[in-house]
Image: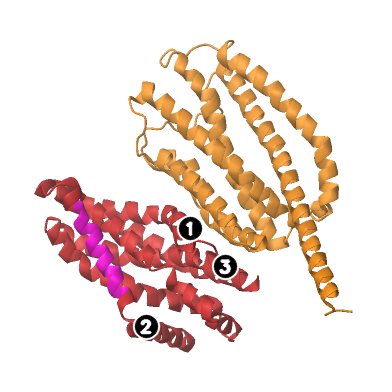
Amino acid sequence: MIHRFANPTRFVRLADVIQPWAAGMTFLFFVTGLYFGLFASPADYQQGETVRIMYIHVPAAWMALFCYTAMAAACGTALIWKHPLADLAARATAPIGACFTLLALVTGSLWGQPMWGTWWVWDARLTSVLILFFLYLGYMALNNAFDDAERGFKASAILALVGFVNVPIIKFSVDWWNTLHQPASVLKAGGPAIHASMLTPLILMALAFKAYYLWVLLIRMRGEINAMKVRALRMRQVQQADMADKVAAGKVG
Amino acid sequence: MSSFITILSRDLKLAYRQGMDSVMVVMFFVIAVVLFPFGVGPEANILARIAAGVIWVAALLASMLSLERLFDADYEDGSLEILILQPITLEIAVAAKVTAHWLTTGLPLIIAAPVLAILLNLPADGFAVLISALALGTPSLSLIGAIGAALILGARRGGVLLSLLVLPLYIPVLIFGVSAVDAGLGGFPFKSHLLALGGLLLATLALCPWVSASALRQALRS
């Protein structure tokens, strides 16, 4: 089953079907989510209008973790089963995840300034997310550091799996340490501690971010597949030109 | 076990005959720490406040600087390939090389640290904690660094890349190392921080040789 979609042509055909749907879902959820988030939901009794930053900040932070988890899973698949598309999926996920992480950090900082009175505190949650951002950067740097693409894939896959240690630390940092960042209020035992009028836009925005990830991931993976094809074509051309030179010089044939 | 000792003594002999490498690491450590009184001003109480952090960060950077050569020399002259072909477990070989790295860089740093602590005016009750924290923390640095050193083999601009890969993973050691000294200075119990450092050491000891061995295999396969 897992190797059924290892064929790039079959994958591209499937991506052709999914991609417009993902794009449509992204627009649909963004429009409804932003409408509910900006107009149809109440301002917080304590935080006022700034609570609306949550509708970007929280989904972005979820996606930062989700993308890293997806990347680590793809890297594991690539190392264990040598699935050719898993490498490409991991490579395509990294910049998207890094952008979500940066977005979470920046919106968190903008939210922290009016609420906590500071742009940045060195508490466990913020620090561990910053480390996550560095791990994404390290993954991308290592991925591109080799002349041999295959070696870059494998080396950075090992790094991604090592860095996965950080993901549970981020998730539970607000429970293990006494942080300024509030503990989880949606994904927790005993149901969400947040009113439905605010939960609706939050869920819609989370779905929008997820659909956006799927959409961009498919575009990027397709780009990677095309880049591989171009590389293979160029290699063949070089080989043929080399061959022709040798024939002309009378060394071969 | 005998292969462990053979590789360890080979690496120590190499380090000893090449001489300058571990001396340079210590010199870097000393100079980096000495820069801080110029940077933040020579006031004794400010220096005492930041001493633990400065020493730890400098130790981190010094230990990282020497990592690049951990596998690189063997990779270039081909002895790494011979090492893989030997009927010994590669993980053991990695553990031996990491031990040699710690003995030639980590241990000299620990010996140099008290002198620097005096220069930075660290109060006397911090010394024992600082030394024990460094003794528990620097082996973890060598172990984590071995992963990075194995991953960058054959990469362009490996040294710069190594810092990007390894420094984020060093942060937990830094946090617990500095907080142990701070707790010791403030008269609080510091045992839990040292236990956390010990836990980190055990976890890295169990996982890192395995991960860097698989990274080495990947490096030599392609």
Real-space CA distance between mark 3 and mark 2, rounded to the nearest whole angstrom: 23 Å
Q: Along the horizontal axis of the image, is A208 left or right of A120? A: right
Q: Along the horizontal axis of the image, is A100 left or right of A204? A: left
Q: Residues within 10 Å of mark 3 (few under 14, many from 20)?
A: many
Name the secondary structure under disc 1: helix
Q: Quadrant of residue A237?
A: bottom right
Q: Which of marks 1 and 2 is nearer the N terminus?
A: 2
Seen in the picture, residue A202 relative to B3 is either above or below; the reply is: above
Residues rendered magenta in the picture: B22-36
Given the image, on which type of amino acid does mark 1 rest? Leu
Real-space CA distance between mark 1 and mark 2, rounded to the nearest whole angstrom: 26 Å
- Residue under circle 2? B12
Q: Which of marks 3 and 2 is nearer the N terminus?
A: 2
- Do pointers 3 and 2 mark residues of a single chain? yes
Name the secondary structure under disc 3: helix
Mark 1 or 3, closer to the camera: 1
Q: Using the image, name the chain to which the residue with label 1 belongs.
A: B
Given the image, on which type of amino acid does mark 2 rest? Leu
Magenta residue check for B28: yes
- Mark seen at residue B215: 3
Chain letter for the part of the structure drawn in red: B
Relative image position of residue A225 (x, y in whole percent): 76, 50
Label 3 close to label 2 by CB (< 8 Å) = no
Q: Quadrant of residue A36?
A: top right
Residue drawn at (55%, 23%) of the image = A55
Q: How crowded is mark 2: few (under 14 residues within 10 Å), some or many (20 or more)?
A: some
Q: Using the image, name the chain to which the residue with label 2 belongs.
A: B
Given the image, on which type of amino acid does mark 3 rest? Ala
Picture colour for chain A? orange
Real-space CA distance between mark 1 and mark 3, rounded to the nearest whole angstrom: 15 Å
- Mark seen at residue B161: 1
Magenta residue check for B124: no
